Image: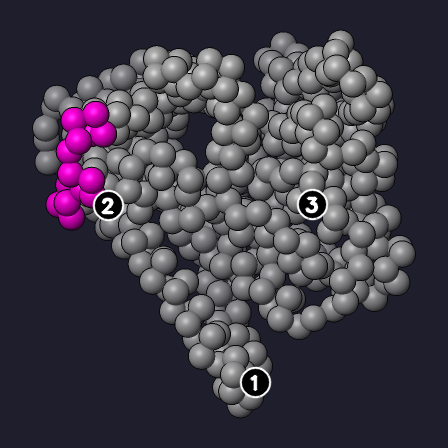
Amino acid sequence: MQFNSYSYLGVLLLTVGGFWALPARFRRWYVLAVSIGFYATWSPLFVLVPVLLCSGVFVLARKIASDPNQGLWYWIAIAYAFAFLVVFRSERGLGPALAALEGSLRMTPGRTMLQAAVPLGISFYSLEAISYLIDVGQRRVKPAGLTDLYLFIMFWPHLIAGPIVRFRELAPQLKFTKNFELPMLLAGLDRLIWGLVQKNVLANPLSRFVAEGFSGPISGANTWLDNWFLAVAFGLQIYFDFAAYSNMAIGAAKMIGITLPENFRFPYLAKNPPDFWQRWHITLSRWIRDYLFFPINARFQGAPLTLYLSLVGIMAVVGLWHGVGGGFLLWGTLHGCYLAAYRIWERIHQKHALAAKPSRHSGALLQLITLVAVTVAWVPFRAETTHQAIEMLRSMIFSFSPRISFSLNSYLVTLLIAAVCVLEPVLRDAIDKLDALAQPHVRLAIANTYLLRPALYALGLFLFVIFDERSVQFIYFQF
């Protein structure tokens, strides 16, 4: 079930109602059963993948804990979890083989082989398993019980596409001992409905323009203006699409008393490349920082050349995490070069004792350069081939032409959604201020809770329904 499907929303309401109706001692098993059932709606056979991963990680974590020197068992455990990512993401791995078996058994009628070829969410829950094993090896957490581990990995809101959580931040909440509170439920509904709006109203309307513009036979005729608009359109589409999923995941979890980490914080307002990665896919960024970047640079004592090379190399790996292809590799490498270039600029800035605080104009220029650089990098990420990406980038840099090749409406919609992206933090701030203003006053608080919020929910659901386009899946489901 897609997060933005009517069936999921109906099941979610029933699930939340059932959760709060149950005594606390039964809630863990209830949530685990719901999570397994949710995953099975995509592919019953592939439920075995996270189950096998959890079972192996459970045994290996105990082996690690009994080894005081992080010896052989530590590396076997890491290799075991990493193997799931490599084997099932490989074109000739177990994913397509299981999909073929499932197709022959007719377990999921109507689904294509492409949709079932990779277990959904494996890129995300494999990283969670690896982080858990590293934390056990470094004595940050103790080995978990089997039920705790299954809940940590398979908790349905974050199972398919994150946020990428850590055991020590989620496990204490999985006792499900909180009492029901209306503000908690409303906070979850806020995020859920805003996510529905982001997906159907802001992300999906751009999908057709992006698909046509990046189509191999068509893209060769794109003009300079076409390609820049397509890069912007895809940047907006993937942001609102992924942020929508994250908001719906955070909202669903909050409705049963679980707080998941934030995943986005207005990334296109980033002031520099490092700031972008503190705003974009935040849970992946901190995973990279804590489990790759810091250990590598600590080993080489933060030598400048090692720092720059590690930034490029690690971001290239992040690109390949999204998929084995030249476009993903180029996207990651570009972001690594952006980060390295910024660190070099910072170093020169400090070395020559330039102005301690950049001027307002230089800060705005750096922000603009960052936005343009991020937009350029989206081209290879979305392009069908590396050759297509290079040709589109060449056109964007060297072949100025103001002509347009697609419907004028596509360009106008892109501009309109870009304006919403700019105004999004203003809207969020206004809602927060309204809540803070109403809270001390009983009548205002009642009006806010029982009149204004339901009206906004109704408006959001109305927009969600009239903009519904069920054929457009979440982009990050393919990763």
Coloured how? Answer: one colour
Residue 116 in magenta stretch:
no
In this picture, which residue range is highlighted in magenta? 349-362
At x 61%, y 18%, the residue is 89
| Within-10-Å neighbours for mark 1: few <14, some 14–19, many 20+ | few
Q: Left or right: where does residue 309 sit relative to residue 396?
A: right
Which sits earlier in the primary sequence, circle 1 or circle 2? 2
Q: Left or right: where does residue 168 sit relative to residue 199?
A: right
| Within-10-Å neighbours for mark 2: few <14, some 14–19, many 20+ | some
Instruction: Kindly state the secondary structure of the residue where label 2 is placed.
Output: helix
Task: Quadrant for the C terminus, please.
Answer: top right
| Within-10-Å neighbours for mark 3: few <14, some 14–19, many 20+ | some
Residue identified by numbered label 3: 170
Q: CA distance from mark 2 to mark 3?
A: 43 Å
Which sits earlier in the primary sequence, circle 2 or circle 3? 3
Amino acid type for the residue under numbered disc 1: Ile
Residue identified by numbered label 2: 411
Visible in this render: residue 59?
A: yes
Instruction: Kindly state the secondary structure of the residue where label 1 is placed.
Output: helix
Q: Left or right: where does residue 312 sit relative to residue 77?
A: left
At x 54%, y 21%, the residue is 295
Q: Is residue 443 above or below residue 429?
A: below
Which is nearer the eye, 457 or 430?
Answer: 430
Label 1 close to label 2 by CB (< 8 Å):
no
Amino acid type for the residue under numbered disc 3: Leu
Residue identified by numbered label 1: 446
Visible in this render: residue 447?
A: no
Which is nearer the eye, 195 or 129?
Answer: 129
